[in-house]
Image (tube, rainbow, N blue to C red):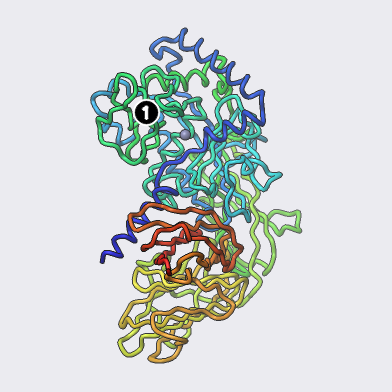
Amino acid sequence: MKTFFNLVICTFLFLNISLGQRNCGAMDVLERQLIENPQMLKNMDEIERQVQEYLKNNPNGSGQRTVITIPTVFHVLYRTTAENISDAQIQSQLAVLNQDFTATNTDIGSVPALFSGLVSNVEVQFCLATQDPTGAATSGITRKSTTKTSWGTNDSVKKSSQGGTDPWNAANYLNIWVCNIGGGILGYAQFPGGSAATDGVVLDYRYTGTIGTATAPFNKGRTATHEVGHWLNLRHIWGDATCGSDLVSDTPTHNTSNGGCPSHPHYSTCSGAPVEMTMNYMDYTDDACMYMFSAGQKTRMRAVLEGSGARASLQSSPGCMPPSGGGSCSAPSGLTTSSITATTATSSWTVVSGATTYTYEFKENSSSTWIVNTVSSTSLNLTGLVASTTYNTRVKANCAGGSSVYSATVNFTTSASSSSCTDTYESNNTKNTSKTIPLGTTTTAKISSASDIDWFKFSSSSSQRNVQVTMTNLPADYDMELYRGNTFIMLSENDGTNDELVKHNTTQSTATYYVKVFGYNGANSASCYTLLAQRSASAYRSVGDDEEQTNGELVKEEFLVFPNPASSDITLVAPFGKHTDGYLTICDITGKVIITQKVTGDRNVKTFNMDVSSFDNGLYFVNFISGDKTQTQKLVIAEMK
Ligand SMILES: [Zn+2]
């Protein structure tokens, strides 16, 4: 029990250091950009002069009193299915921005009386772009598949030449990139005055919006509120220095950043010992604990959006107007094709306000003749398609005042196999909806889309404790995970269409096992795979109890540390799986981190040596973190003398 307690503390502390603390990259990025681009410093000086001029001319926030709407585009860059966050998750982020910048957030009432007079409606709104820089219809979301594990903060995510996505004209759009940033950074922004080629905000996919991959304690969309604050010229509330200035007159002087969720009143030790405004969006507190901008911050933001401000051009942006030639209604967005088989597919799109019908067209990629359909709903089932063929689709809306322009053309390719299968197990996309499968009899099912996940369950018995799950006939690169109850046991992730296999030998009887099947990097197919779950009293064993193994091709999942006890050097065997980097860390029994080291591997097991001769005798915890998995081993240091 004691050991478990210490283990929890150690793991918690480590996560606190790498992930639990808000970490915004905006100031580090600013420092780098100022070195790379000396002009930016001059620009920022000029902008600051304009801000001060605005303050003089508009005392007490008496500037323009209209809501300014900022056309916004999200650029999603993804390597894994999880990183390709849904439209709904992006909408949830947009909703938070719209609430926070109008002080209509549901937690605004939590502002303590001391600061309630300073709460400010910034009168800024954000709309998803409806026309792109060429005037064509858009959903306001771009998506790009990438092989990059993480992007860091060097702006490469904003450059197509480096695998990223170029920004849309920064004079007309707020560009928000969503990707795996890495390094514990939640997001970063570029201040006004920087290069248009890198202008905008970058968010980590785990800290965007309020649903899907959004991860506590940063799952209320406030990373974007904070970063857009920087993008509109706000500084951190502690001025990035001990008792520093944030260039805003009505915010109290903060000692430094506040993390977590400080209780109010939290006193500063700066001159005058003011109560700190820890609930300000520009502090580092948890999402649930930041909920206001001050009046001074509003004025500073409005200064760059109005008159001769650095971002004033956004006010005349056409980004959220109907696409050119759109008549009285805008072009449909979100055109996508699903349920694709060798001969059938379903196209669907987002409803357009005012549309009475839609003109949907499709054709083989090699053909120049569109096949025209007029429909009143927002989807159409296509039949009689040719296998292994790429098709083009487009749709326009028909309103009383005329027709919109066509949406952007979207392609899909029919599957090769004409052998179709029936997936009787859907819906089983979550562990809670796992379908019970028979033991010893093959089951066929399919991963029909990039977001489809199949969950199955079965039980071992007291006399048959050993289990084995095999996946064969894989039509694409599918992987499989095995869980016993809520405990993750192992992952099988062979490349391509190689079979997957997991075996588990345990002393635990009558356990419920869960099998998760999913496509690597969104792999899916209209063809079925075959799954076979078996249990046995003696088979599938290798050496001993409570031991997992996979076939020889697979990555062994176990993180090993030896010798143990050790005195001078240890060897760590780290299973990277499909990841290319990770962290090794060692904590002592009090939870203090002794060593943290970033390590790189390459979809494989890698061995590291570490000198521990300076360690005191005692018990330590060694963590290996890769992807979203943390593995921990106990290590005893004993000086052998
Ligand atoms: Zn920041």
The x and y percentages for residue 505 are 41, 83
491 left or right of 196 in image: left
Relative vertical location of residue 264 with respect to residue 482 in this rendering, above or below: above
- Left/right of residue 190 with respect to residue 538 in the rendered view: right
Q: How many labels does the image show?
A: 1
Side of 151 where 470 appears, left or right: left
Q: What is the quadrant of the C terminus in the image?
A: bottom left
Count residues near mark 1 (Cα–Cα under 10 Å), then give few for <14, some for 14-19, many for 20+: many
* Residue 416 vs residue 441, the one in the foreground: 441
Expressed as whole percent of the image width and height from the top left, the position of residue 97 reads: 43, 35
Position of 548 relative to 251 (above/below):
below
What's the residue at 37%, 28% (across, down)?
Answer: 255
In the rendering, at what x and y percent does residue 351 appear?
49, 46
Q: Which of 80 and 594 is in front in this view?
A: 594
What's the amino acid at mark 1?
A: Asn
Task: Give the residue furthest to the front.
Answer: 641
Res 589 → quadrant: bottom left
For the N terminus, give its image quadrant: bottom left
> What residue is shown at x 66% (from left), y 25% (from top)?
38
Please give the residue where the numbered disc 1 appears in the rendered image: 255
User: What is the secondary structure assignment of the residue under circle 1?
Assistant: loop
Q: In which quarter of the image is residue 139?
A: top right
* Residue 136 seen: yes
- Residue sitting nearer the eye, 455 or 206: 206
Q: Is residue 167 above or below residue 318?
A: below
Indicate the position of residue 536 as horizontal and vertical percent values: 40, 89
Residue at 40% in and 14% down: 61
Q: Is residue 635 visible?
A: no
Q: Residue placed at 54% from the left, 40% from the top? A: 202
Q: Which of 45 and 226 is in front in this view?
A: 45
